[in-house]
């Protein structure tokens, strides 16, 4: 990972979803690169969505395992906090670019984090928001 990159929630969820082995392996590699290069970024929204998703698994991830993952993986990547500017930008993006509220928050957080790439399968691969480009790592 050579550029500052934002990782969307689905990247982290796939690490624990063994039903899709190829996506899981790609997600694990992307997270490893993000941590090793210190170029990976997440927001509190990603952490919150991750916990909600893994607690809804058929066999939910335990709170102890979530706490360990928080300390070793999410916390070192956490660089974007909620601010009034983040919300204002997200409102503008949602309206202007016709995104859902949560997708607009992710794009806004990636922009606030100074990222050049947003890794997500939830947004259109190759779409740009200023200097930020969406990349679907599973494409």
Image (cartoon, rainbow, N blue to C red):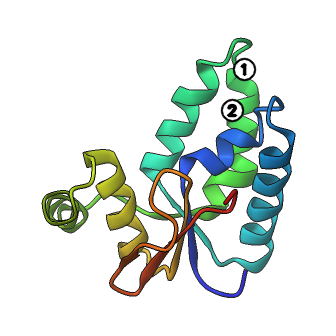
Please report the residue visible at 33 percent of the width from the left and 84 percent of the height from the top: 130
Q: Is residue 70 visible?
A: no
97 lies above or below 8: below
Left or right: 113 in relation to 71:
left
Which residue is disc 2 drawn over?
Answer: 66
Q: Position of residue 59 (x, y in %)?
A: 74, 13
Left or right: 95 in relation to 108:
left
95 lies above or below 5: above
Please report the residue visible at 81 percent of the width from the left and 54 percent of the height from the top: 28
Please report the residue visible at 75 percent of the width from the left and 51 percent of the height from the top: 72
Q: Position of residue 77 (x, y in %)?
A: 62, 63
1 lies above or below 15: below
Name the residue at the top extreme. Answer: 58
Q: Position of residue 11 (x, y in %)?
A: 65, 50
How packed mark 2 is, by other alpha carbons closer than 10 Å (few <14, some 14-19, many 20 or more), is some
SS at mark 1? loop
Which image quarter: residue 10? Answer: top right
Q: Quadrant of the C terminus?
A: bottom right
Circles 2 and 1, Cβ within 8 Å, touching? The answer is yes
Please report the residue visible at 17 percent of the width from the left and 62 percent of the height from the top: 84
Which residue is disc 1 drawn over?
Answer: 62
99 lies above or below 34: above
SS at mark 2? helix
């Amino acid at each position: 990972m050579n550029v500052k990159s934002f990782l969307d929630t689905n990247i982290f969820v796939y690490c624990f979803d063994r039903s899709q082995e190829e996506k899981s392996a790609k997600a694990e590699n992307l997270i490893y690169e993000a941590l090793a290069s210190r170029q990976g970024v997440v927001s509190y929204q990603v952490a919150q969505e991750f916990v909600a998703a893994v607690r809804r698994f058929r066999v939910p991830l335990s709170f102890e395992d979530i706490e360990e993952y928080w300390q070793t993986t999410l916390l070192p990547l956490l660089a974007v906090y909620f601010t009034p500017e983040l919300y204002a930008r997200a409102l503008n993006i949602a309206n202007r670019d016709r995104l859902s509220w949560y997708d607009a928050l992710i794009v806004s957080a990636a922009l606030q984090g100074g990222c050049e790439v947003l890794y997500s399968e939830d947004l259109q691969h190759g779409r740009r928001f200023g200097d930020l480009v969406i990349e679907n790592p599973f494409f």
